[in-house]
Amino acid sequence: MTTPHLRNYIGGQWIESESGEVFDDLDPATGKVIATATKSGKADVERAVEAAQRARDAWRLYPAPKRGEILYRAGEIMLQRKEQLAREMTSEMGKVLAEARGDIQEGIDMTYYTAGEGRRQFGDVVPAELPNKWAMSMRHPLGVVAAITPWNFPFAIPTWKIMPALVLGNAVVFKPASYTPMLAVRLVEILEEAGLPKGVLNLVLGPGGALGDALVTHPGVDLVSFTGSSDVGAHISEIAGRLLKRVSCELGGKNAIVVLDDADVDLSLEGIVWSAFGTSGQRCTAASRVITHRGVAKDLVDKLVARTKKLRMGHGLEATTDVGPVVSKDAQEKIQSYIPIAEREGATVAAGGQIPTAGALANGFFHEPTVLIDVKPNMRVAQEEIFGPVTAVIEVRDLDEAIKVLNSTKYGLSCSVYTKNVNNAFRFMRDAETGLVYVNAGTIGAEIQLPFGGMKSTGNGHREAGRAALDVYSEWKSIYVDYSGKLQRAQMDEPSTAS
């Protein structure tokens, strides 16, 4: 069987990179090559941005409802290919098949939702302060958007960026993570088939670093939309900020599930297991901390350890698999490096903590689901984003201490509280310093019709999804029409009349 080869998409053509270099696309569960991909460089960025610049004016003038219709057709194609796309995703980045289907469905939902904005994109008509004057605001596209996306949601997150950008009349240069080029190609193929004009969407494949910097600093790029680590987000913000570019960053998290003494412990257990170990902990919203009231801590920890030890690792396409691999050898080694750090600081490994070395699991990039106990709020494992199947249990005296511990990290993306007390729930919702708050649910599961993003170092204040996403990919234009037939000076006192 011939190994698939993935190419760039520039100006409506599938082409190789200027250098002709390639890189391998691996199945993280087996370490085997499932595809090769062209490796882009600065010259390819130049071609992609130029193609986007050529296409942007015609696309800006293309009626917004018609832009929405193209997105709607793309959603229909996604729905038809959902199973195929999900299977390719599992093979490419490792998440179990049920989760991969959810990733594709989120992309479908976002595409349908955004298609509707082709007939909305509401502005405002407001009263003017002067007679015979009309005042309104409307949206205007930015121009060329660079969409730089991560590997953990290789279909959903690109739709969060690309669909709002397109429906608002922007052209896009799409640079996906190098771990997941196949899903990026599939998304572009779908939009091409749906009738997107040539040059409106362009794809450059390859690792970040120099390629990402070339895209971020290109003078023809008007907005950089990035999802990834806080370190890379800070770097992008620095080099783009020198050029006064608009930057939207959705970055890391150190999310917590709080379990109070009046909680349904069994229900909270379900939320913890799903939030901590779903996608092998490789979600920006993963529950890497469990903050539990001392009154229920022993019961909760005993049950959590027992459940964690029963989780089955394996290839995500196998029906018996609960937890798939992490995305790469580097990710596996980074996760493992935190275990001795935790132990040196006084934490105890209650479950997991190892890299499997026997059988088929040894061929892939697996890490055991891990529960750390005896964790204090200031330990590194309670402060730093591990991005793997590791959760740290921290005991507290009451709700006030729980909220203090929750807010004690530099991140502020997602949190949840388990309680039967409505007063506790509302205090928690008010005081949690996170962009997402759940009550009696885990920390994962955001829906596309509400804003997604976080506070503090989790981002730079922008939001994705929902109506808020439209503000990222458009400018506000205020318009005044004076039909009085004379000069009227706003905010100026009328001159007094001489007697």
Image (cartoon, rainbow, N blue to C red):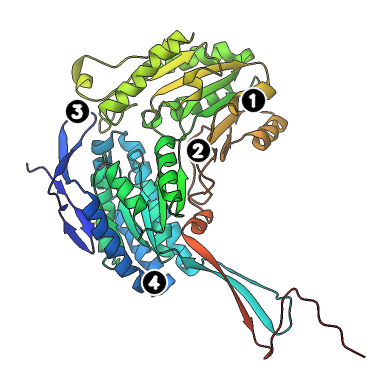
Can you say which quadrant of the picture contains the C terminus?
Answer: bottom right
Q: Are marks 2 and 3 in contact (CB under 8 Å)?
A: no
Considering only vertical position in the picture, is 36 above or below 137? Answer: above
Q: Crowding at label 1, few (<14), some or many (≥20) Cα neighbours within 10 Å? A: some
Q: Looking at the image, which residue is at 44% across and 59% down?
A: 114
Give the mark nearest the N terminus, 2 or 1.
Answer: 1
Per the image, label 1 sits on a secondary structure element best described as: helix
In this rendering, position of residue 196 left or right of residue 344: left
Q: CA distance from mark 2 to mark 1?
A: 18 Å
Real-space Cα separation, disc 3 to disc 4, in angstroms:
44 Å
Nearer to us in this view, 357 or 56: 56
Camera-nearest label, 4 or 1: 1
Q: Secondary structure at mark 4?
A: helix
Identify the mark nearer the N-term, 4 or 1.
4
Type of amino acid at the residue the image marks with label 1: Lys
Looking at the image, is mark 3 or mark 4 earlier in the sequence? 3
Residue underneath mark 3? 30
Residue 94 drawn above or below residue 447: above
Label 3: few (<14), some (14–19) or many (≥20) C-alpha neighbours in 10 Å: some
Relative to 51, is 116 on the left or the right? right
Q: CA distance from mark 1 to mark 3?
A: 42 Å
**Pointer 2 or 4: first along the chain:** 4
For label 4, the residue is 66
Residue 401: horizontal and vertical position, in percent? Answer: 66, 21
- Residue wearing tag 2: 458
